[in-house]
Amino acid sequence: MVFRILTVFILTFAIAISGCTKSHPGNYAQPEVEAQVKKSLELIEIQLTADAAGGYSGTGKNAEGESYKLKISQDAVLKRLSWKADGDRGDMREGNFQFE
C-alpha cells in the first residue's frame, strides 16, 4: 500500500514539473512569455490569457499610449515564440523569439 502511494506521488510530481520548463522546449510559462514579448515589442503593459492551442492572446500598451491586440503561438520543435500585434492606431507587427 505504501509503495502504491509513493508511486502515485512520484508520478504526479514528475508530470507537474515537466510541463512548463525550459527542459520541455516550446511550452514556456506565461510570465516568461509576457516578459519576452513585452521586451521585444517595447510595451509598458501586457495582459495575456492562455488558449487551448498552447499559445496566448491578450493586449498590450506602449509608452506612446498605443494599444495592441496580441496573438502569440509556441513551436515546441523550433523552440520559438511567434507573435502578431495589431495596434489601435494602425501599427501592425509580427515577430518571433528563438529560445536557446
Image (tube, rainbow, N blue to C red):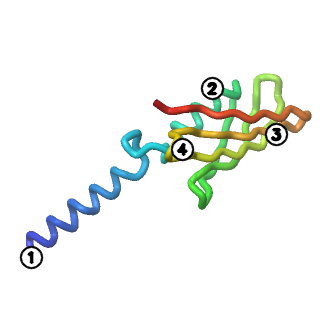
| Circles 1 and 3 in contact, beta carbons < 8 Å | no
Marked residue nearer the N-terminal end (4 or 3): 4
| Circles 4 and 2 in contact, beta carbons < 8 Å | no
When the figure is inspected, residue 28 is found, relative to residue 9, above or below; the finding is above
**Mark 2 nearby-residue class (10 Å; few <14, some 14–19, many ≥20):** few
Depth check, mark 4 against mark 3: the one in front is 3
Picture coordinates of residue 42, whole percent (x, y): 70, 24
Can you identify the residue that label 2 sits on? 39
The residue sitting at 63% across, 47% down in the picture is: 73
When the figure is inspected, residue 5 is found, relative to residue 78, above or below; the finding is below
Marked residue nearer the N-terminal end (4 or 1): 1
- The secondary element bearing badge 4 is classed as helix
In the rendered structure, which amino acid carries the disc numbered 3? Asp
What is the spatial separation of the Cα atoms under label 1 and label 3, in whole angstroms? Answer: 56 Å
When the figure is inspected, residue 37 is found, relative to residue 24, above or below; the finding is above
**Mark 3 nearby-residue class (10 Å; few <14, some 14–19, many ≥20):** some
Picture coordinates of residue 98, whole percent (x, y): 55, 32
Can you identify the residue that label 3 sits on? 86
- The secondary element bearing badge 1 is classed as loop
In the rendered structure, which amino acid carries the disc numbered 2? Lys
What is the spatial separation of the Cα atoms under label 4 and label 3, in whole angstroms? Answer: 20 Å
Find residue 1 and name its label. Answer: 1
In the rendered structure, which amino acid carries the disc numbered 1? Met
In the rendered structure, which amino acid carries the disc numbered 4? Gln
Marked residue nearer the N-terminal end (2 or 3): 2
Depth check, mark 1 against mark 3: the one in front is 3
Can you identify the residue that label 4 sits on? 30
